[in-house]
Image: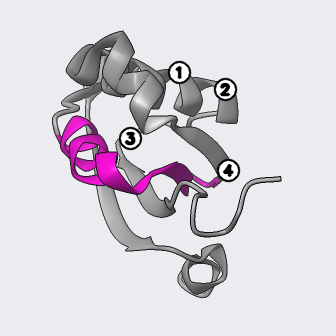
């Protein structure tokens, strides 16, 4: 068992897709993972270790490692096309606890 001081710190990112189309959870995951992979590359993607925790109504929660948080936010901010249409991914809030984000959803 890993001691709590040795555990990797994680951050939850509350985001919203700003586009005219509705996305399913799998489409949202593909868009997010593609954005992070194209910006950070395979090594950066594995360091960031992103995971889509929740998604509904074009907004959701993404989990990533704390040291790579700024890079993940930058990758999401650079998105200009969603499913071939103009759009962006807006980061609304970042927290260390998912319960703090659920109050805003």
Q: Are marks 2 and 3 in contact (CB under 8 Å)?
A: no
Furthest-right residue in this view: 1
Q: Secondary structure at mark 1?
A: helix
Of marks 1 and 3, which one's residue comes earlier in the chain? 3
User: Is 11 on the left or on the right of 41, as rendered?
Assistant: right
The picture places residue 79, in percent across and down from the top left corner, at 23, 32
Q: Are marks 1 and 2 in contact (CB under 8 Å)?
A: yes
Q: Secondary structure at mark 4?
A: strand
According to the picture, the residue beneath numbered tag 1 turns out to be 30
Vertical relation: 68 (above or below) 79 = below
Callout in the foreground (4, 2): 4
User: Is 4 on the left or on the right of 74, as rendered?
Assistant: right
Of marks 4 and 2, which one's residue comes earlier in the chain? 2
- Residue shown at 22% from the left, 52% from the top: 70
According to the picture, the residue beneath numbered tag 4 turns out to be 53
Kindly indicate the quadrant of the structure image that contains residue 74: top left
Is the residue marked by circle 2 packed among few (<14), some (14-19), or many (20+) residues within 10 Å? few
């Amino acid at each position: 068992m890993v001691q709590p001081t040795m555990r990797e710190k994680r951050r939850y990112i509350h985001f919203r897709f700003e586009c005219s189309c509705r996305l399913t959870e799998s489409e949202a995951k593909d868009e997010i993972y593609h954005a992070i992979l194209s910006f950070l590359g395979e090594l950066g993607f594995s360091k960031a270790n992103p995971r889509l925790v929740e998604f509904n109504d074009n907004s959701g929660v993404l989990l990533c490692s704390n040291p790579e948080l700024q890079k993940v936010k930058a990758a999401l901010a650079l998105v200009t096309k969603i499913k071939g249409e103009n759009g962006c991914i807006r980061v609304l809030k970042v927290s260390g606890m998912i319960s703090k984000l659920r109050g805003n959803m």
